[in-house]
Image: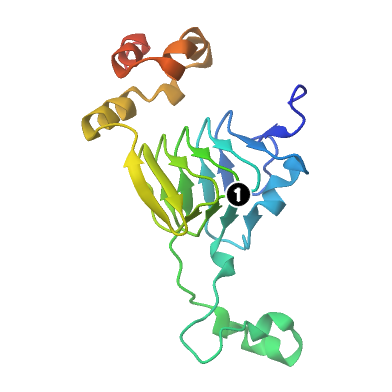
Amino acid sequence: MPEQPRVVLLKPLVTSPLIEVGEYSYYDDPDEPTAFETRNVLYHYGPEKLVIGKFCALGTGVRFIMNGANHRMDGPSTFPFPIMGGAWAEHFDALTGLPGRGDTVVGNDVWFGYRTTVMPGVRIGHGAIIASGSVVVDDVPDYGIVGGNPARLIRTRYSEADIARLLAVAWWDWPAEHLGRHLRTVMAGGIDDLEAAAPPGR
């Protein structure tokens, strides 16, 4: 973004087929923000995917730890000997079958605070807020606010009924032109206002 050299839209930068990022999601970092794919998505050897929705705001130092970071824990040593090569490489099959939790999935309109860490296979719901410095080890509900290490649910931003209404209106799927006409409502309106502003069929 020309006016903000430390802020980059992620979708045009991602090259890995194992990473999907929605429109308008951005990363903010004063040091090499364009290197997000290699500096912020760690141990991504596949096949698990990282999926980030639309309109997500990622603060400096957000890290996604992928399943490739796992080590065996069912034997006396956790050390991954076969990756050192040489004669040890013939035991590479000892690294197969490590437990995994599947894809890491982030919903739409999620705000990640400074230096948050997301562990493998976590699912973060729409509209969630992740407090600075959090280590997210468990799923986060839609519109949940979590913080700490490990991150715990502090509260939800809305009641269960209101969350259902917000998910139904799904403003992040509105056409860009329509969204542009109703930005004040999306940013500062009530749920009634948002429902009234929704395009036909929402």
Instruction: Say whether residue 59 is left or right of residue 152.
Output: right
Q: Which residue is mark 1?
A: 115
Q: Which image quadrant: the N terminus? A: top right
Q: Is residue 56 above or below residue 151?
A: above
What residue is at 52 percent from the left and 45 percent from the top?
A: 51
Q: Position of residue 177 (x, y in %)?
A: 52, 10
Q: Where on the picture, by quarter, is residue 191?
A: top left
Q: Residues within 10 Å of mark 1 (few under 14, many from 20)?
A: some
Task: Give the colour scheme shown.
Answer: rainbow
Q: Which image quadrant: the C terminus? A: top left
The amino acid beneath tag 1 is Arg
- Residue lying at the far top of the rendered structure: 181
Q: Position of residue 104 (x, y in %)?
A: 48, 52
Label 1, secondary structure: give it. Answer: loop
Q: Is residue 39 above or below residue 112?
A: below
- Residue lying at the far left of the rendered structure: 161
Q: Is residue 29 above or below residue 134?
A: above
Q: Where on the picture, by quarter, is residue 150?
A: bottom left
Q: Position of residue 18 (x, y in %)?
A: 59, 51
